[in-house]
Amino acid sequence: MKNVLFTAFFAGMALCASAQKTVFVSPTGNDAWAGDRNRPFKTLNRAFAESENSRDTLYIQVASGDYFLEKSLDLSGGLNCPVVVKGNEKNKPRFLGGIKIQQWEKCRDGVYRAFVPEVKRYGYQFEQFFVNGVRAVQARTPNKDWFYVKGSEEYPYVSGVRSANYATQKIVMDKQDLKSLSGLSADELADVRFRFYHKWDITQKEAAYACPDSGFVYFHGGGMKPWNPISKGARYIMYGYKAALDAPGEWYLDKADGYVYYMPREGENLETAECIVPTLHQWIVVKGHSGAALKDIRFENLSFQYAAYSMPKFGDEPMQAAATVEAAIELEYADNVTFANCEMQHTGGYALWFKAACTDNTIDHCYIADLGAGGIKIGSPWYTSDSTLICRRNVVNNSIITHAGSELPCGVGVAIFHASDNKVTHNEISDLRYSGVSVGWIWGYNNSDEIWTNVLMKDGTVDFAQVRLVSPAVRNLIAYNHIHHIGWGELSDMGAVYTLGESHGTRIVNNIIHDVLSYDYGGWGLYTDEGSTGVEMSSNLVYRCKSGGFHQHYGKENRIENNIFAFGHYYQVQYTRVENHLSFHFRHNIILQDQGETLAGPWENGKIDMDYNLYWHLNGKPQFGKHTFQEWKKLKEKHSVIMSPGFKDAQNDDYSFASLKAARKIHFKPFDLSKVGVYGSAEWKEKAKMSVQQLDLFKEIAKVRLKK
C-alpha cells in the first residue's frame, strides 16, 4: 500500500518538471536504486549527487514520511546545475537529526530509564532530549529561578586582550545551595554544570573542583569579562546531574551505564511517546568557494527537526547574541538559495546562518521554532577587511520565529552582523529571552581609535580587538514585523530591535513591538546602542516595555520619528550619553503613559532635534525634568503638545484613531497596523499566535520582575 501511495505522489509531483531531470526520494527507498518513480533513493545526499549528470534544473521530489539522518547534507563538493527539492505541502516530509529512544522501564517513583547503546558502546553524549516534540529540561537546581553568588576571585595565567585567555576562578556560594552536591563522587561532580547569568549573556562551565561543605567551586578556562564578571549577586543554576532529577520534565544521562533517566510530565505515556535524542549538529551545509559560489537551490515544503548542541570543552564563555554558536543549517559562498514553506525546529543552537559571502538568499514562509539559541544569523560576527565575504541582499520574510533561548538564552531572533542591504519583513518574532532583531556589530564610530569588535584570531578563536574600520552593516531594512514577549525577565540590556555601530541607510519602520521584559535594567523596544549612526526608526508602535519604548545609549544623527511609544513601566523614552554632535532627531512622536518617567536621562543637555511631539499621561502630568511644560517648550519643543492622542482603546491594545485632531497638530502620519506581521492563510496567521498559557505565564513573571 505504501508503494502505491508513493507512486501516486511522485506521479503528481513530476508533471510540472517532466522536461527536466527528476529524481525521487522515499523513506522506503534505497540509494543503490535508480532514483526513478518506482525505485526511489533513500537520502537527499544521493539525490543531489545526480547533479553531476545534469545541466538543466534537477528536481528532487521527496515523499512524505520520516527520514532519520545519519549524516548532514553536505554540498561543499559543488553542483553542476540548479536544484529544486520539494515535498508535499500538506504533509511535509520530516528530516530528523536524531535517534529514537524506546523500551523505557520504571526505576523509582516517577522516574523511568532507557538504555542508549550509542552511549555505552561509542561514548556518545547528548545534551538535548525531546518527548513528543517538547524539549525536556536537563535536571537542574533550583527548579525555578536562581541561586546567587556570594563572591569570587580570579587567578589569571595567560593574558589576553580584554580578559585573560586562561584563568582559574574561585566562586563563593551559599553552602545550603550546594547541598545537592554533598556526597557525590569525583565522577558525579564532573557531570555538574553551572550556568551563570550576566547582564546580556551567560557563562556555563563544568566545575574543575567543588567543595560543597565549604561553599567553594573552582573553574578554569577563559578569564572573566570585565563588563560581565561572575561577581557577588550574579545568578546561577546547576544542571546535568542525577541528584537534581526531581521534577516532571527533567532528564539526566548517565554516561557510565548508558541510561537516560526521565521523569515524565503529566499525561505523557513513554510506551507511545516519540522520544528523540539529537545526534547531528547540522542538517545542511552549503559551502561554496571564492569564485565558485553554490547557487540556485530551492528547498520547499520540508520539515527539519532535532539538531544537537554540545558545550565546548572549557564551557561557553560570555558572547552577546550567542554570536559564534553554530546553526543547524549553515551557508557560505551561497547565492540564490531559498527555503520556502519549510520548518526548522528543536535545535541546540541557531536554526540557520548565512555565514559569509552569501547574497540574494531567501527565507520565506518558514516556521522556525523551539530553538536552543536563536533563529537566523546573517553575516559574520568577526570583522574582515575582505569585502567579498560580506553577506548582501538576503531576505527573511513572512516567517514565524518563536520560542528561543532554551540552551543559550542570549540568542537573537534575527541577527545581522557584518552584512548589508538585507531585509527582515513581515515576520512574527516572539518568545525570546534576548533581543528580537539585532543589526550591526561594531561598538563605536567608524575609523575611531575606540572601536571594539570581534576579530578571528590566528588560533581560530574569536576575541575582542580595537581596530580602525568602517562598519559594513548598512542599508538593512527591518519592516512590518510583529516582535513581542521577549526577555522573560532572564537577561538585561536588550531591545526588541537593537542596533550597534554606524548603520547608514538602515531603516526600522512599521513594526509592532510590545511586552519587553528584562531581568534588571534595559528592557527597551527600540534601542540604538554604542555608535549607532544614520538609523531611521519611524512609524513603529511600541508599548508595554519595562524600560521604555526607545533608548539611545550613544550615537549620531539617527531619526526617531512618527512613532507611538506607550505604557512604558519605568520610563517612556530614554537617553544616556551627551555628545558634541547631533545625537538624534525626535519628532512627530506620540508618548502615552500611565506611570513612570516621561523623558529619562539628560535630554535637556543633549544635542537633540526634538519638536512636534505629543505627550499624554492618563494618571497625572508628563514630566520634563525640573521644568514646566511651557518652560520645556521654550527650551526644546516649541510646537509639542500635551493632549489625548485620540486612540480608540489603547489600554486594551487598540491604537487605531477615534479622532485625528491631536495627531494633526504634530503632523503625525497614521500608519496601517493591519499590514504588520505574517500574511497568507488564516491557518498561518493563527500559527503565529502564542498560546493563552504562554501569555498568562509571561504576565505572572512580569508581576515579579516589575517589582525589582
Image (cartoon, rainbow, N blue to C red):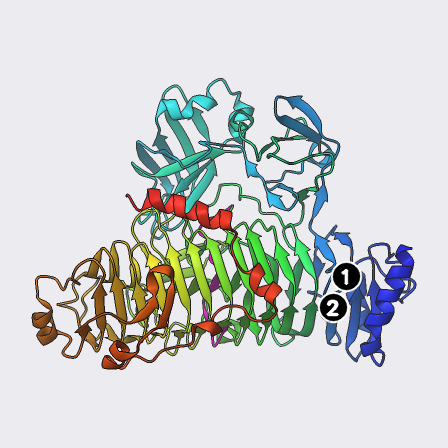
Pick the residue in front: 71 or 410: 410
**Magenta extent:** 407-423
Disc on res. 85: 2
Asked which secondary structure carries label 2, the reply is: strand
- Left or right of residue 671, residue 422 in this image: right
Q: Is residue 35 visible?
A: no
Going 27% across and 77% down the picture, which residue do you hit?
663
Q: At label 1, which amino acid type do we have? A: Leu
Q: At label 2, which amino acid type do we have? A: Val
Disc on res. 594: none
Quadrant (top left/top right/bottom left/bottom right) for the N terminus: bottom right
Q: Secondary structure of the magenta portion, mostly?
A: loop
Pick the residue in front: 78 or 84: 84
Instruction: Tell me the crowding category of disc 2: few under 14, some 14 to 19, or many 20 or more residues within 10 angstroms, Cα based.
Output: many
Residue 172, horizontal then vertical, whole percent: 34, 29
Res 595 → quadrant: bottom left
Marks 2 and 1 close (CB-CB < 8 Å): yes
- Left or right of residue 333, residue 621 in this image: left
Q: Which residue is mark 1?
A: 44
